[in-house]
Image: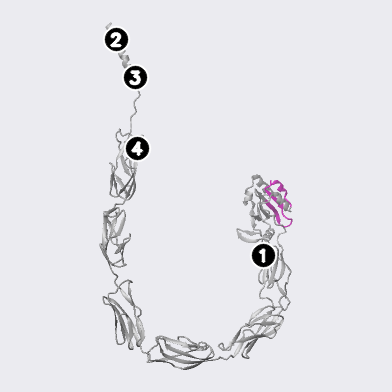
Amino acid sequence: MNKLLLSFLTILLFAGCHKEKEEEEEKPKEPEREVTAIYLDKSTLEIRITDTYAFTTTHEPDDLPAPTIQWSSSNSEVATISTTGLLTAVGEGSATITIAAVISPETSLSASCAVTVAKQLATQITLDKTAIHIEEEETDLLSFTLLPNGSILMAATWKSSDEEVAIINQEGTVTAVTPGEATVTLYDAERPEIQATCAITVSKKSPRYVLLSREQLTMRYFQEETLSYTVFPEGAELGDPFWSSGNLNIATVDQDGKVVALSQGVVEIIFTDRDNPHIRAICVVVVELVVDIAFTIEEVTIFCGDETFLTYTISPSGAILEFPLWSSENPNIATVSQEGKVTGVGVGTTTITLIEETDPTISTSCTITVLTVPTTGIRLDQTSIAMTVKDEVTLTYRIEPSNATDKEVEWSSDRESVATVDAYGKVTAIGDGSCNITVKLKNGTLSSTCQIVVTPMISSIVLERESLFMEHGEIFTLGIFHLPTQAIPPASYHWSSSDEWVATVNQSGRVEAQRIGTTTIRVEIPGGIYAICTVSVFPVYGAWREPELLFGSSLSDIEKAENRVKNEISTSTGGFALIYDGESGSGLQYCIYFFGASGMNYCFLAFDDTDAKACDAARGYCEERYKFESESDGKRTYRDKNGIKIVTGIEDIRDREEYQNLTFLEKTFIDIWLNYKYTWFAISYMK
């Protein structure tokens, strides 16, 4: 019984333990925790060279152990970082400090800080000068150095302790204002204790030199002149100015600079400053003795218009006139220059006088008699003139000699029904015939005559041809006839062409045929008189018509305009081309029009490229109709009057864009029509 109970209890105990174990196995395990973020205490940092900063780091969750941190700098020339997070600024610039941590094979974390390193601040200023001595208005420049080398001031500022004595700008330039003493200081406005000073002593301007108002004077006995002086630099003052004479017997000078001439000779007037021995200036004074002056000739006779120079003597010998003044008693008879040149102006007698302006008692005079110059001849510039009614011409004359006194003339015509003349020699043609125009001295018998022949005006002009038929390139010069025939031909003609595309004409009447067509050649003379000639340039080459150049037109528009025989294959082209046979016997094989979405866009005349005669005719056809522009690769380019482009030369139809844009079926039609001949001599027309 006991054994049975023990066995039962054992079974129950085993079953209970097994159940607890199963429950423990069924309960889920809690996941392991890890760091999810790391941080630096700063995201940006500004620091100066040589400074340091110790970064601190944090992480989340903060109850977990700190991960292992790796430190790095993006620019070690700007900032370095230790393995413990100590940053050292080593150079100016920017760098990024980064921390990184590997949490697990799948997880890596990082954070960074942008670091800006500025220059080091100066700890000491040294000026290049500690004391300056300058004069008023002078300047001096101060410079400075900073320690340590390469450092800077946050706000460098200059100041003066007394700006009434000296001022200083922010570039370090000291300017002296007034005499006295002052101190200039350079300091850092952000750190006033960083400074340096310089003592400034300002003294008055000292004179450098003086200039006298005159360096040389010429004077006469007892004449007075006052000298003045100017001190340089401006504003400087003399201590004890003093005037003196090198020879008091010749000239004296007082302390106001007044010089008095006493006797003949040369003397130095000296100016000095006894407080400044280097100040010295000299004026050389020449004292001359003038006793008397006299003209060498007392009476002179000249003709009107003549010139003569008067000369004079001064005693004693060697003396001069300081301010000679010449004058004429009657300038209407004779004038005199300040060099003594006398000019005869009118008949009569006058007196020329010379005086010393500063002493009118020193004078002399000369009597001048001016006589008339007799006229010996009068000459007209022309002896005969041919004129037309209403023409005008002005005659000129010459009096001989040119300085003759009597120059007044009068004009006359012996037949005023033929020509008249006014008081100025202007001749006007009145009617047919001849007459004499005479110019005569009003107060004499001398005269000169010019014959005037007046012919009638041209009433009309006629060209030798009323019409002219020409070929391309032909030249013909038109002749002109005038009516009445005795009329004088005009000096020039004006030629013109109404259409220079067809023919041109030069100003000699030379007509040159340019292209097929008709134009009017017109020649005109003054008075609106003209004549015309109709010029027709006819074709030589090409017994065929030009294509209908209706670009942009529809196929039906071309069919209505084109009179050639349409080739039967045209009905099979499906509307992309119209094909016409060339005129029989002309050498033209085909005339072809191509059409696109916008209508007719290209056409050409096709000639057998082996038919030399037809090709030459095609070239000549273009030359006599269109304007040549250029030639390249054997092809010649032209333009017609409307600007349409024309190209001649050997053409392979397969090279044309219009052919290449066709469908296979369309190309087949063209190939059949051309009998598979692709190379032609073509005249192509295109916009």
User: How far apart in space, not on screen, are marks 1 and 3 (Cα)?
Assistant: 122 Å
User: How far apart in space, not on screen, are marks 2 and 4 (Cα)?
Assistant: 62 Å
Q: Which residue is mark 2?
A: 7
Residue 330 rendering spot, x and y as whole percentages: 50, 88
Identify the amino acid type marked 4. Answer: Leu
Q: Which part of the image, by quadrant, shows the C terminus?
A: bottom right
Nearer the observer: mark 2 or 3; the answer is 3
User: How far apart in space, not on screen, are marks 3 and 4 (Cα)?
Assistant: 39 Å
Q: Which residue is mark 1?
A: 500
User: How far apart in space, not on screen, are marks 2 and 3 (Cα)?
Assistant: 25 Å
User: How far apart in space, not on screen, are marks 1 and 4 (Cα)?
Assistant: 92 Å
Identify the amino acid type marked 2. Answer: Ser
Which element is circle 1 on? loop
Identify the amino acid type marked 3. Answer: Glu
Quarter occupied by residue 61 = top left
Q: N-terminal of the two: label 2 or label 4?
A: 2
